Structures are given as C-alpha cells and as structure tokens.
Amino acid sequence: MIAPVVKLFKALNTNSHPGEIAHAASIGILLGFVPKNNALWYILFVFFLFVRIHKGTLFLSILLGTLIAPLFDPLLDALGYAVLNIGALKPAYAALLEIPFVAFTKFNNTIVAGSLAASLILYIPVYILTRFLVFTWRKFAAPALAQNKFVQALYKTPLAAKIAGFFTEVEL
C-alpha cells in the first residue's frame, strides 16, 4: 500500500509530466466511481493499464473514488435512471442487450450508468484540478518544505533521511 504513495511523491518531485499524473487521477476517479462487480469495470481497468499514465496516482485515485462513491449513490442512481430513460437511446440499449456478453457489463444498471456518466462529466474538472495541484506543489510547496528548518532537521536523522530518499530526489 505504501508503494503507490511513494511513487506519487516521486512523480510530484521529478520530471514526470503533469499530464500523466492528471490523467491518472481522472481515470482513477472514473474507475473508483464505477461499481466493481461487472465486466465493464474489468475491461476499463485492463485497458487503462496499457495507457501511459502514472500508475501510483491511478491506484490511489481508484482508492479515493471507491471511498467517496457510496456517498453519492442516490445522486448516481438518479443520474443513471435519467440516462437510461432517454427516449432516443432506448432502441440502442435494447439492441446492446441482444449482443452476447454485453449484459455482463451491467450497463443497464442505474448505479453503473449513473457512475459512468458522472465520472465522465468529472473527468476534465479533475484533470484541471490535478494539473493545478501538481504545478502548485512543484512551484511553491516543495521548495518551501525543503527550506523549512524542521524538515531539514528531520532529514538529518538517519531513519528519516532513508525514508525521505524514497519520497524525493531533491537534495537539500
């Protein structure tokens, strides 16, 4: 569990492209919101493992999305009901259900449809917010933290110096 956190801090402090981190956060929220008991989640998860994004951020975002998604279940259910009851799409939904194995995606479940629609709507705002947070961290927070007297004293202890070596590659 600590490995994704270590990878995230390394990415924040090294030359990892901010877009890779931001896409990973957005995709992680998408996967975190979608229920995990259907084929759609597994198909998306395997697909996104082959995309060039920051995997540590992906796994932490999936965990975060999974933890906060139940708080929005009534809203996701209502959104899914609205998406599934769009009159023009009902024939398409019926045709999809006729295709073998498509029903295993449970796209016709209101929570699945609502969580997928909500996470697609949230993709760009989460991306922009994450890019801003990475920029802010690299420009202001990391240098200020490196200059902090307490942090410098903490880095001089042998155990903390060894742990800090995992989190950052910035020399003090």
Image (cartoon, rainbow, N blue to C red):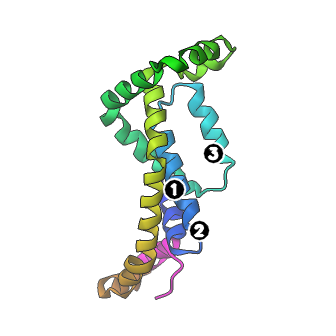
Residue occupied by mark 1: 57
Query: Upstream in the sequence, badge 2 or badge 1?
Result: 2
Question: Circle 1 — which element?
Answer: helix
Which one is nearer the viewer's eye here, 49 or 139?
139
Q: Around disc 3, counting alpha carbons within 10 Å, would you say few (fewer than 14), some (14 to 19), or many (20 or more)? A: some
Question: Circle 3 — which element?
Answer: helix
| Cα–Cα span, label 2 and label 1 | 12 Å
Residue occupied by mark 3: 48
| Cα–Cα span, label 2 and label 3 | 17 Å
Q: What amino acid type is highlighted by mark number 1?
A: Thr
Is the residue 23 above or below the residue 37 in the image?
Answer: below
Which of the 4 image quarters holds residue 69?
top left
Query: Mark 3 and 1 residues: CB-CB less than 8 Å, in contact?
Result: no
- Give the image location of residue 31, x and y in percent: 51, 40
Question: Circle 2 — which element?
Answer: loop
Residue 47 forms part of the magenta stretch = no
- Give the image location of residue 57, x and y in percent: 51, 56
Residue 146 falls left or right of residue 74:
right
Query: Upstream in the sequence, badge 3 or badge 1?
Result: 3
Q: What amino acid type is highlighted by mark number 2?
A: His
